[in-house]
Image: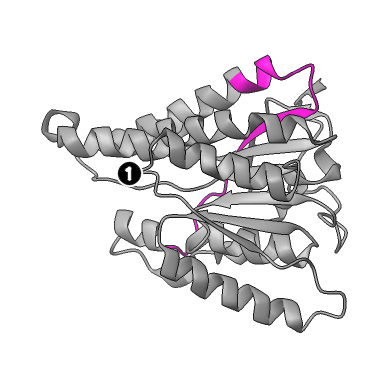
Amino acid sequence: MTRATTTFDPRTAPLADDALRGRVIAITGPTAGYGRALAFECMRRGAEVILIGRNVKKLEALHAELCARRASDATPPPEPVIAPLDFEKAVAADYDAIADAIGQRFGRLDGLVLNAAILGQLSPIERHDVPLWVRVMHVNVTAPFALTQVLLPQLQASPDASIVCISSGVGRTPRAYWGAYAVSKSALEGFAGVLADELEKTHVRVNTLDPGRMRTAMRRQAYPSEDVETLPAPESVTGPCIALLGAAARGVTGGRFQAQ
């Protein structure tokens, strides 16, 4: 495995239409924003997509949309799979059930996108709500760690597995009032760095990706007065994540990349 250097840039990596064909990719938080855009793009590129989210109705609606899109393809990719998991309420047995189901159905996992996150509140530290702080840290850091831990055997069963942690600019350059969200993204970056170092001699690579400004509900929550028309759609910045998941980034690990 090669430690990531400035010579690799997922924004300029060449991508074939079938860049993910034959790969099994799990995405957390796939029903909205960047996760939703990734679900469609991963499937379009040929991946068998596992949709991990908490809202079963939204997962089923997304599954139906993906299947409708899939039916119109000349060479349809495999049908996506739903895996309900509530990061706020899940216990150890719920994580184990996801890992067992993936192991029994696929025998391996080629990609894991840790995308699910909540914003919490933008507030000075001295007035930040403590229970909300704990909730944000759990959903954005502890739950992704727990999911990754139980899925490592399936990732290690792949000849070329990729973990992509979706980060944020405030996770890399903390700013006032971003509270638990900024701290959680900094922690996710640290988690990715530790894991990349531990797995350096394996076939599992670990990188972080900051998608940048996007037209999403979370962005509107953080910047309610911003003109959304000035923001790129999530669909327009999926390419770098696809590159990190596919053969274009084979052997690249420990990187901290940007999509814009």
| The magenta segment | 195-216
Q: Amino acid at mark 1?
A: Lys
Where is 166 relative to 150, above or below?
Answer: below
User: Is residue 135 something one can see in this rendering?
Assistant: yes
**Which residue is nearer to you in this view: 120 or 141?**
141
Residue 192 lies, in percent from the top left, at 58, 27
Where is 79 relative to 68, above or below?
Answer: above
| Left or right: 224 in relation to 244 | left
Question: Circle 1 sits on which residue?
Answer: 89
User: Is residue 175 something one can see in this rendering?
Assistant: no
As for residue 198 lying within the magenta part, the answer is yes
* Secondary element at tag 1: loop
Residue 162 lies, in percent from the top left, at 72, 37
Residue 118 lies, in percent from the top left, at 36, 48
Q: Quadrant of residue 8?
A: top right
Residue ID at (41%, 38%): 140
Residue 205 lies, in percent from the top left, at 73, 30
Residue ID at (74%, 58%): 48
Q: Quadrant of residue 94?
A: top left
